[in-house]
Amino acid sequence: MSDRWNDSMIGMDKAPDRVGLTWLVSAAIVTVLLWQFPFGNYILYPFSILATWFHEMGHGLMAMLLGGNFKRLLIFPNSSGVAFHSDVRVLGPLGRALVSAAGPMGPPLAGAALILASRSRASARTALLLLGGTLVLSALIWVRSLFGLVAIPLMGLAILAIALRGSRWLQVFSIQFLGVQACISTYHQLDYLFTRQALIGGRFMLSDSGQIAQSLLLPYWFWGGLMAIASFFLLYQSLRLAYRT
């Protein structure tokens, strides 16, 4: 009888994990479906802006790590963005390719980290505080477009409010939901990964895949496909580890 009682309690402990994972997967599926309709882009607009911020911060921070100077970040109302930085000083063509790849891989890497942070309430709250604080700080240091100077701090303050005032459930679910949205944002603009050039800020520029191909061997579509696969792998592995019992 004691064993049956223990088994029952274990089952109750596991149930919330299964329910939480079901909600996250369902949210991801609904997100993909909403992308297919014009009104869906309005509903998901804040998450598109956040994904753009992850993307451009990825470029800028990687450039800094490789000896460059992260000058400024522009985010536009159509959810596009661009990061301006000086050329990297180390690793030559490989360094330039890493800076280019850090953009598309920024959202899934950040998303995976957020999902993993949800394994405990303390780490989830800490991750929300770090994310919200970094959003506000980045607006002070790098963001230089009028739209970005309004949108980025507002999102940061909203996330900080959840970290400081939200319930335990809301904090954990929020960090997981933001993580999943960041990971799957790669597939919202999947065509961008398989495009050599893109219209950004009113002018045509080499896409990130195009810049990687320019710096290294193999065509742009190979690198686009590799980053798409890596994004899915990061989402799958982070969810698997977060819900591992």
Image (cartoon, rainbow, N blue to C red):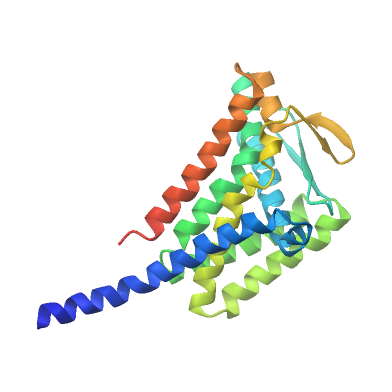
The residue furthest top is 217
Image location of residue 13, percent across then percent down: 31, 74
In the rendered image, which quarter is residue 162 located in?
Answer: bottom right
The residue shown at (50%, 53%) is: 113
Q: Is residue 211 above or below residue 161?
A: above
The residue shown at (17%, 82%) is: 5
The residue shown at (59%, 22%) is: 94
Q: Closer to the camera, 153 or 78?
A: 78
Badge count: 0
Q: Is residue 61 above or below residue 38?
A: above
Residue 1 relative to residue 237: left or right = left
Q: Closer to the camera, 141 or 57?
A: 57
The answer to whether residue 227 shows anywhere in this view is yes
Q: Is residue 162 above or below residue 137?
A: below
Image location of residue 59, percent across then percent down: 67, 39
The C terminus is located in which quarter?
A: bottom left
Q: Closer to the camera, 174 or 85?
A: 174
Q: Is residue 2 above or below residue 124?
A: below
Residue 192 relative to residue 225: left or right = right
Image location of residue 206, percent across then percent down: 77, 28
Image location of residue 129, percent across then percent down: 58, 66
In the rendered image, which quarter is residue 209 located in?
Answer: top right
The N terminus is located in which quarter?
A: bottom left
The answer to whether residue 127 shows anywhere in this view is no
